[in-house]
Amino acid sequence: MSASAPTNIRHRIIAVSMLMAFILYLDRICLAEIVKSASFKTDLPLTKEEIGRILGAFFFSYAIFQVPTGWASDRFGARKMLTAYIVLWSLFTGLTGFMSSFAGLLVMRLLCGAAEAGAYPTSGAIIRRWIPLQSRARSSALVAFGGRIGGTLAPFITAWMVIELGHWRRPLWIDGAVGLVIAVIYWRVVRDRPEEHPDCNEAERAIIGQPPVEPPVPTREFIAMLGAFCRSRSLWLNSVGQLFTNIGWAFLITWLPTYLKEQKGVEDIAGGRMVTLVLAFGMIGQLVGGWLADLSVRRFGLRWGRVLPMFAGGCLGGSAYLVCLTQDSAWGVIACCCMVSFAVDMGNPATWAFMQDVGGRATAAAFGWGNMWGNFGASAISMLVPLLLELGKSGGTGQRNVFLLCAGSLFLYGFIALGMDATKSVLKPATT
C-alpha cells in the first residue's frame, strides 16, 4: 500500500459494530422463543400475563436507561462504555439461564435491558465521528442490519438449540459466552475518534473530514441537557414517532411466535422459520432504507430528505397490518408481516441519521432520548397483547384488535415524522 492510500479503519469499525448489533438482538429476542418451549413450560408454568410482564420488562428498563447510558458514553468515552455494556448484558443473558422463578427472570430481563440500552446510542455517536454526513444513513443501516441478522436468526437458532441441547437454559449460557468474546473484539478494534486510532492514516482522515471536536456535556449540565431535549419540537416528534413505531413493530419479536403456535397451529421449528423470514425482510428494508435516506437528502435537502423515508415506511407498514385482517392462512399473515418488517426497517436509517444530525455534542444522549420513548412502545405492546386478546375473547375479536392497534400506530408514526426538522440542533455549541 502506498503512503498516500487511505486505510479502511472506518469500515472495520462499522463491521465490528454490526457484530455488536448481532449479539445485541440475539440476546434480546431469544427469550420470546424460549418461553414457548416445552422444557421452559415444565420448569416454569407461568401465565400469559406473567410472560408478558417478563418480555415487557426488558423494553421498560431498556427505555429508562437510554439517556443515562447515552450520556455516560458522551461523557466518559464511547469505546470504554460500549465494551462495558456488552460485557454486562452478556453476563445477564447467561445468568437468565440459572433462574427458576418469575421474579428471577423478571430481574434478569430488567438488568439485561438496562445494559443493552447504551448500545445503539453509543454506536450512533461513533458513526457521527467516523462517517461523513453524506454516508451516515447507509452506515447506520449497516449497523442496524447486523442487529436484524441477529434478530432474524434468533428464533430459528434458539428453537434449534433448545431442541438439540435438550433444555431452554443452555442456549442462554452459549449466547452469554459469545457476547463476552465480541466485547473483546470491540475493545481491540474501536477508538472514539479517527485521530486516536494508531492505524488510521491522514488519507483516511481526509475522507472522514473534520467532525467538530466538542466537549461532552459535563455532569453539572445534565439537567440542562434534558431541558433542551424537552424544548426541542423535532426531538419530541421523533420520540413520539419512535413510540408508535415500536408499538407496531415489537409485536413481530414478542407475540408473533405465540400467535402462530396457538392460533394457527404452527409447530415450534416451523414457527421459528416463519418469524426468521419476517425479520429477514427487515434486513432488506435496512439496506434499502440506508440507500434511500442518503439519496433523499441529496435530492430534497436535509429538512425533507430525512423525513420522507419515515413517512413512506409508516404508511406502508400500517397498510400491511390492515391486510392481515383479511388473511385466514398462517402464510398469508406471514406475508403481511414481512411487508411490515420491511417497511419499518426502511425508515430506521433515516431515524438514526436524524438523531446524529441534531444531537451535536450530546449525540448518544439524544439518540437515547428517542430510543427511550420508542421502547416504552415496545414494552407497552408486550403487555397490551394479552389484555386485548382477553378483552376480545368473548366476541372473537382479540387478534383483530391487536392488528388494528399496530396498524394505527404505524400510520401515526408516518404522519408525525413530517413535522421533524433535521436542520435544527438540539443543543447550542459549547462555548470556549
Image: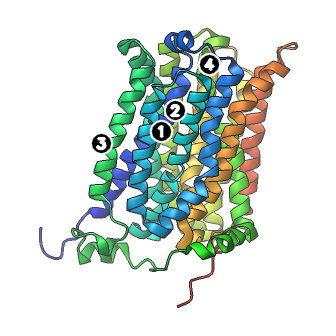
Helix, strand or loop for disc 3: helix
Report which residue position mark 2 lands on.
29
Indicate the amino acid at tag 4: Thr
Helix, strand or loop for disc 2: helix
- Residue 264 in view of the camera: yes
Image coordinates of residue 294 in percent, x first then y, are 51, 61
Task: Answer few, some or many: residues within 10 Å of disc 1's Cα (few below 14, many 20 plus, some between 14 and 19).
Answer: many
Q: Residue at x 48, y 80 (%)?
A: 214
Indicate the amino acid at tag 3: Val
State the separation of the CA atoms marked 1 and 4. Answer: 19 Å
Report which residue position mark 3 lands on.
181
Quarter placement of the N terminus: bottom left
Report which residue position mark 1 lands on.
25
Indicate the amino acid at tag 2: Ile
Image coordinates of residue 61 in percent, x first then y, are 62, 44
Find out whether the residues at labels 1 and 3 contact each other: C-beta distance under 8 Å.
no
